[in-house]
Amino acid sequence: MEQERLQKVMAACGVASRRACEEIILAKRVKVNGEIISTLGVKVSKKDLIELDGKPLLREEKVYYILHKPTGYLTTVKDSLDRRIVMDLLSPETKEKRVFPVGRLDYDTSGALLITNDGELSYRLTRSNKNVEKTYQVRVEGILTQGAVTRLMKGVEIDGILTKRAKIENVNFDREHSSTLFWLTITEGRNRQVRKMCEIVGFPVKKLKRISFAGITIEGLKEGEYRPLKPHEIKKLYSL
C-alpha cells in the first residue's frame, strides 16, 4: 500500500502548511496508531489512524478562495493580542473548513490573498524556489526615474541578497502631487520586499496593493470580500 510522509498527509488534510505540520509533530502532538510521533520522516498509509491532540484526523474536501484583504488586518489564523486578523473576514461556514492564508500580506498592504485548507498546495506556492508571480499596484513618493526603474527590474540588494528580476508596467506620473503609480511584478515573497526595494532606490511607498497572486486577481471584489476559485484557476495553481 502506498505510503506518504506524515507531515505531507497532515498538510493534505488541511491541518496547516507542511512546514507547520513538521513543528506540530516535533511538539509531540501527533499519534499514529496510538503511538506518539516526535521525529520527522515517519510514513503512513490510508489504513493508519492519525490523531492530532487526541482527535482523529480526517481528510477534508479541499476549498480555495481569493480574498481582497483590506489594510489593518494581520495575515494569520490567530493573534494572542486579539488584533484584527484576516480570519475575521470569513464566514463561520468557511472557517469550519479549517482554512488558512497562503503566505503573508503585510498589515498595511491590501489586496489578493489566497485562502485554503490545502496545505500541500500552500507549501508548493510558498517554496522559495518557485517563481510564483505576485503583481502589486504601487504608489511611491516622487516622480520615478528611469534609473530607479532599471535598478528595480535588474534587482536590488536587501540584507546582502540580490532580489530576482522584476517587471514594471503601467507607469503613471502625478506631477501635481509628486507621486508615481505603477505595477510591479516579483517572484519572491521576502518580508516587506516591495517596500524595501522602493525605499532602496529612493522612492518610498505611499500605498501598496497586491492585485494578483499567481495570476489570480481581485477583480470584481471589494475590500473584505472573497470568492471561491474557479476550476481552471485551481488547475493553474497546481501547474506552477
Image (cartoon, helix red, strand yellow):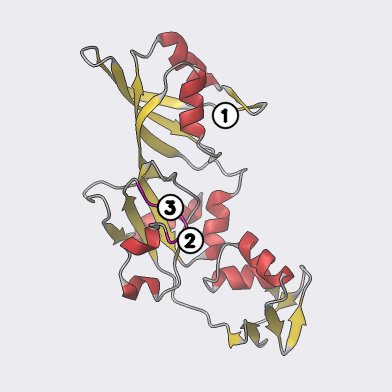
Q: Is the Cβ of the residue at disc 2 closer than 8 Å to that at disc 1?
A: no
Q: Which residue is mark 2?
A: 79
**x 54%, y 64%: residue:** 119
Hey, what amino acid is under mark 3?
Leu
Q: Which residue is mark 1?
A: 164
Q: Under tag 1, what secondary structure?
A: loop
Vertical order, 108 against 94 (above or below): above
Instruction: Report the front residue among 87 and 155.
Output: 87
* Quadrant in the rendering for residue 172: top left
Q: Quadrant of the N terminus?
A: bottom right
| Magenta region, residue range | 72-82
Hey, what amino acid is under mark 1?
Lys
What is the number of callouts on the image? 3
Instruction: Report the front residue among 173 and 187.
Output: 173
Q: Under tag 3, what secondary structure?
A: loop
Hey, what amino acid is under mark 2?
Asp
**Residue 199 percent coordinates (x, y):** 48, 22
- Between circles 3 and 2, the one closer to the viewer is 2
Please state if 76 lies on the left or on the right of 144 as rendered. Answer: right
